Image (cartoon, rainbow, N blue to C red):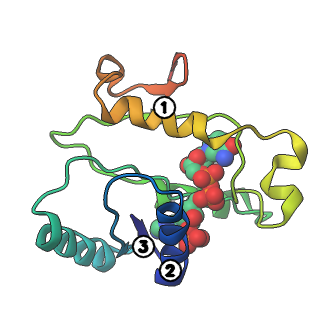
């Protein structure tokens, strides 16, 4: 599990471990907009696990900057990735509980309208399990794909 703040990662890791879920979890510091940080994370992963099978890039910024150019720039910096030899999927996770619109109680639950992020997790899992391979390169949602 990668993130910019090791403190936040440790909190998330203990929350996950406390659920009693099976498997092992380790953390690595990563800012997806920082080339040096990406290289360090790659080296760290190589040392611990030997290789990377799947990368789930959930990094996102929900900027409220009034300048649309700044908002687009921030969005693109967090979303950029190469695709050589990889199966790449873009994904719409559904409107679900998250910190995208703020960390306050109401914002997190999308003012009462956001759904369960477990649904988004299941879409990610289905791709990792190869169940959505036919949709590689597409903009995937729970029940199908959106046209680009
Ligand atoms: N939630 C929804 O309903 C919804 C709907 C449509 C699309 N999406 C998309 O789903 C994706 C995930 O969003 P979310 O709802 O999970 O948002 P979130 O709760 O705000 O999580 C986004 C995470 O991205 C991390 N991040 C931001 N910039 C980063 C960087 N440069 N390097 C590494 N990590 C970075 C943030 O880490 P920090 O804690 O360090 O800030 C944050 O934990 C986004 O692409 C979003 O557009 C979500």
Q: Residue, x 38% and y 75% (percent of image)?
A: 34
Please say if 50 is above or below 56.
below
Please give the name of the residue rendered at 89% of the width and 43% of the height, measured from the top-left corner. Answer: 112
Between circles 3 and 2, the one closer to the viewer is: 2
Judge whether 136 appears above or below 88 on screen: above
Asked if disc 2 is less than 8 Å from ligand 1, the answer is: yes
Mark 1 element type: helix
Are the residues flagged by discs 2 and 1 in contact, CB closer than 8 Å?
A: no
The tag earlier along the polypeptide, 3 or 1, is: 3
Judging by the rendered image, the residue that carries numbered circle 2 is: 5
Q: Nearer the viewer, residue 104 or 16?
A: 16
| Front-lying residue, 24 or 85 | 24
Q: Nearer the viewer, residue 135 or 83?
A: 135
The CA distance from mark 2 to mark 1 is 26 Å
Q: Position of residue 22 (x, y in %)?
A: 37, 52
| Residue 32 is at least partly visible in this image | no
Horizontal side of residue 57 vs 63, given as left or right: left
Q: Which residue is mark 3?
A: 31
The numbered dot on residue 2 is none
**Mark 3, other Cα within 10 Å: few <14 / some 14–19 / many ≥20:** some
Closer-to-camera residue (15/73): 15
Left or right: 13 with respect to 75?
left
* Callout 3: CB less than 8 Å from ligand 1: yes
Q: CA distance from mark 3 to mark 2?
A: 9 Å
Residue topped by disc 1: 123
Q: Secondary structure at mark 3?
A: loop
């Amino acid at each position: 599990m990668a993130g910019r703040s090791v403190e936040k990662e440790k909190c998330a890791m203990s929350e996950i471990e406390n659920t009693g879920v099976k498997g092992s979890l380790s953390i690595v510091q990563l800012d997806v907009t920082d080339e040096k940080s990406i290289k360090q994370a790659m080296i760290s992963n190589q040392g611990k696990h030997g290789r990377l099978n799947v990368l789930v890039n959930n990094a996102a910024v929900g900027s409220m900057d009034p300048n649309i150019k700044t908002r687009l720039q921030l969005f693109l910096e967090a979303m950029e990735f190469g695709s050589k030899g990889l199966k790449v999927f873009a994904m719409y996770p559904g409107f679900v509980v998250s910190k995208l619109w703020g960390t306050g109680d109401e914002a997190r639950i999308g003012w009462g309208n956001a759904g369960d992020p477990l649904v988004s997790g299941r879409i990610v899992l289905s791709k990792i399990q190869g169940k959505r391979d036919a949709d590689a390169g597409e903009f995937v949602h729970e029940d199908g794909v959106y046209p680009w």
